[in-house]
Amino acid sequence: MGEAPANHHLTKVEPSIPQKSGWIVKTMQIGGEIAQRLAVSGPLIFSCICLAIAYKNRKSRVLHRSVSMAALHGGNVALQRILVSTEARVDKDAAETALQEFKELLSAEKISFTQLHKVAAKLEMTRQEDEAVRMLREASNKARKDGKPHESYELEMLLVEMLIFKGTYYEALTRRCLEENTISDSRRPLYKAVVYKILLDDDRAQEAYNEFCEIRSLFYSTTDNIEEGAQLYGSVHKYETFEKVVGNLKREIENAHPINRTENLHLGKTKQVFGYRKNGK
């Protein structure tokens, strides 16, 4: 598996549209130009539109957790997750083969992180994130031992997102990638802000969120030079909107997983503890 350039945190991946025939492709062809203009001109507006579409079409089903997380990243990621969500619901075969595809991607000589994120979203949508977490732990540890720091970092970042979807927030916070302060990657403070907000640690959530916005503002003008790896996309610029999206994400996680609630005192507030495990670090 090849190692990517050191400046991966300044990179961006153009979202790929699932190669499916029928109404999905036709709809995307008709609305593609409008969608791209919205994504470029207003990531926050576009993210909210994507969420509105998802909630409108979900009927009685629970909205996928990865779609809410994508809304926090911004327009292009939200668009990609909406497409993957639609594909997973319509194409049952694609959902059933996602786990095998995930294994093959992890064992490839050079990992396609774009495709890996896409398949990981399918695993979340089909409630197979437990297996994804196990494989990502192993793959990240192996990459670190093999002297592939960038690969290990990217795998661990995806692992953090999957751990959040599982509700194992404390394990997510202990991953090494979230302490890589020398890397200007907006995902690091974003994931921290999400976890702290869910655990009702508002001070740390606000601090991490401000860092997220600062990094996004600093590197926003550099996003023309993008390579495969990181997801520096649009941003949620209002903390109140961030809080609402995280609130939705929290409810989706609670609906997806049995929750072991324990009362703990933290800065004078009650927080929820979700199955913290130290293994895998």
Image (tube, rainbow, N blue to C red):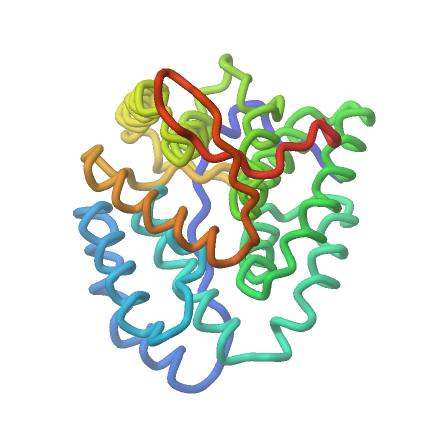
Quadrant housing the C terminus: top right
The residue sitting at 61% across, 51% down in the picture is 116
Q: Where on the picture, by quarter, is residue 142? A: top right
Residue 100: % across, % down: 75, 63
Q: Nearer the viewer, residue 48 or 185?
A: 48
* Residue 190: quadrant of the picture: top left
Dividing the picture into quadrants, the one containing residue 191 is top left
Residue furthest to the top: 182
Q: In the rendered image, is residue 215 in sight?
A: yes
Furthest residue to the bottom? 22
Q: Is residue 231 above or below residue 76?
A: above
Residue at image location 21% in from the left, 41% down from the top: 241
**181, 170: nearer the viewer:** 170
Task: Give the residue drawn at x 33%, y 51%.
Answer: 248
Q: Judge by depth and name the residue closer to the eye, 161 or 262.
A: 262
Relative horizontal placement of residue 19, taking residue 61 as reference (left or right): right
Q: Is residue 24 left or right of residue 107?
A: left
Where residue 222 appears, as percent x and y from the top left, is 33, 29
Name the residue: 62% across, 22% down: 176
Q: 277 above or below 116?
A: above
Give x and y (percent) for residue 146: 82, 27
Count of numbered tags: 0
Q: In the rendered view, would you say 1 is above or below 100?
A: above
Q: Position of residue 178 (x, y in %)?
A: 53, 23
User: Which quarter of the rendering shows the N terminus?
Assistant: top right
Asked whether residue 228 appears in the rendered view, the answer is no
Query: Is 83 situated above or below 271?
Result: below
